[in-house]
Image: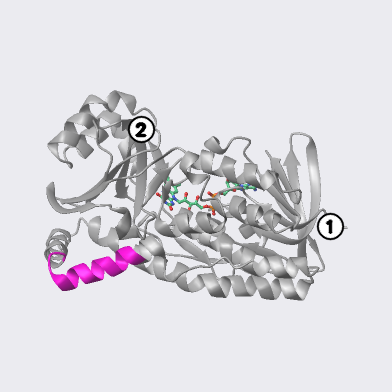
Amino acid sequence: MADADAIVVGAGPAGASLAFLLADRGIRVTLLERQSDFAREFRGEILLPSGIDALQQMGLANLLPSIPQSRPTTLSVYLNQNLVIELALEPALFAGRPPVAMSQPALLEMLVAEASKRPAFCFLRGALVRELLREEGRVVGVRAQTAEGEHLLHAAVVVGADGRASLVRRRGGFEAKEQAPPMDIVWCKVPRFHEFRGARAYLGRGHLLIAYHTWDDRLQIAWAILKGTFGEIRRRGVGEWVEEMANHVTPDLSSHLRTHKGTIVHPFLLDVVSDRVTCWSTPGALLIGDAAHTMSPVGGQGLNVALRDALVAANHLVPVLRAGGDPASIDLAMRRIEAERLPEISSVQRAQALPPRIVLSRAWWGEPVRGLIAALLLTPQGRRVAAAQARLFAFGKSPVQLFV
Ligand SMILES: Cc1cc2nc3c(=O)[nH]c(=O)nc-3n(C[C@H](O)[C@H](O)[C@H](O)COP(=O)(O)OP(=O)(O)OC[C@H]3O[C@@H](n4cnc5c(N)ncnc54)[C@H](O)[C@@H]3O)c2cc1C
């Protein structure tokens, strides 16, 4: 007999939510996570209305307020240090679900704690999946390594929710198409910026800096750089890099960055990737979240679309696994999951592709085009286009309903 109905590899937002949903519906699920501590894996932390809605549909609404978080109250956009947009992020603008920066380790601990209350759930922490098990061309389980040794685990379906460097993607023979965004992001946190509780974006002269108040009462800085130039930044040293950022923002933030430059010890590089597997399943195995489609950071989408993948995966997997999990029905369910999620993922990835090319361009046309776009944003038509884009990022392409 199989060890479980489903094996989920990776307890990020996609895997932990899917495992919770399956266990909650009585499906025997084993969740494997290579890390023993969620804080050891870096993740994005901005939850948008679409992601909050997904967590609420999972029945977790009453637990969300207890998770450390910060709700940005304003969004200010600067072009060449001049304020061009100032938006109060009122809950009404977001159908009552305004964006929040939320502690991901705490969110994931909550998900696995809730799942652990269900007898159908088994969680192996510190379990590194090394290989897929196959029988007659079908994936039937995984080989995993824990501190106790090696384990062979079998299930009717294996879900790879193991992120951007997914082993399930590699070992499952999945092929991916990449978009090659022209940027990388340098991340660092500095102490809180006075009483600032909002988010700011500074554009201009081929640079982009985003700053927002975090759940742990600090200021997160994201500095977009041209792909491949991090080595040069490191060689020049933190002091020079902070000076470059300080020259790009308004005087209040410049002096804050200069004052606290000694606190920036290990800036973290996000190697920006945007890709998507051409087919999300192979007999016996499915990919979801970053494993299926690694998202560019534009619009803070990765975490939110991962949560929505989990809802759709649960919708299709619960009925077939409840009915005994015959292979043909599982494979059909997996194809339906892809068919349902693909339109949103491809729309979002298309929408993410253009902005960095314009914002970061150092070509002669960069500055005039940015100026033109800023002027267009002041027209009703320009605002309508921008609002449609913002709606896609905030709410997704269309509603996703959990119906199991
Ligand atoms: C610096 C940075 C900033 C970001 N900012 C944002 C943002 O603001 N908003 C947003 O929505 N998204 C953001 N993202 C993207 C977001 O973090 C991801 O899209 C999201 O975490 C994807 O969720 P996931 O569950 O698919 O994968 P992950 O969160 O990557 O989780 C995968 C899990 O699988 C585990 N794992 C991997 N391999 C194995 C294995 N072989 N065996 C067992 N376990 C394994 C990993 O340890 C990990 O816990 C950001 C990402 C980065 C890196």
Q: Earlier in the sequence, mark 2 or mark 1?
A: 1
Q: Is residue 233 above or below residue 23?
A: above
Does residue 183 belong to the magenta stretch?
no
Amino acid type indicated by mark 1: Ala
**Highlighted magenta segment, given as a residue range:** 377-391
Mark 1 is surrounded, within 10 Å at the Cα level, by few (under 14), some (14 to 19) or many (20 or more) other residues, namely: few
Of residues 20 and 233, which is closer to you in this image? 20
Q: Which mark is residue 350?
A: none
Mark 2 is surrounded, within 10 Å at the Cα level, by few (under 14), some (14 to 19) or many (20 or more) other residues, namely: some
Image coords of residue 215 (percent x, y): 40, 37
| Quadrant of res 352 | bottom left
Image coords of residue 260 (percent x, y): 26, 26
Q: Is residue 133 above or below residue 269?
A: below
Image coords of residue 165 (percent x, y): 56, 52
Amino acid type indicated by mark 2: Asp
Q: Which mark is residue 2?
A: 1
Find disc 2 in the rendering and name its residue: 217
Real-space Cα distance between discs 2 and 1?
Answer: 46 Å
Q: Residue furthest right?
A: 1
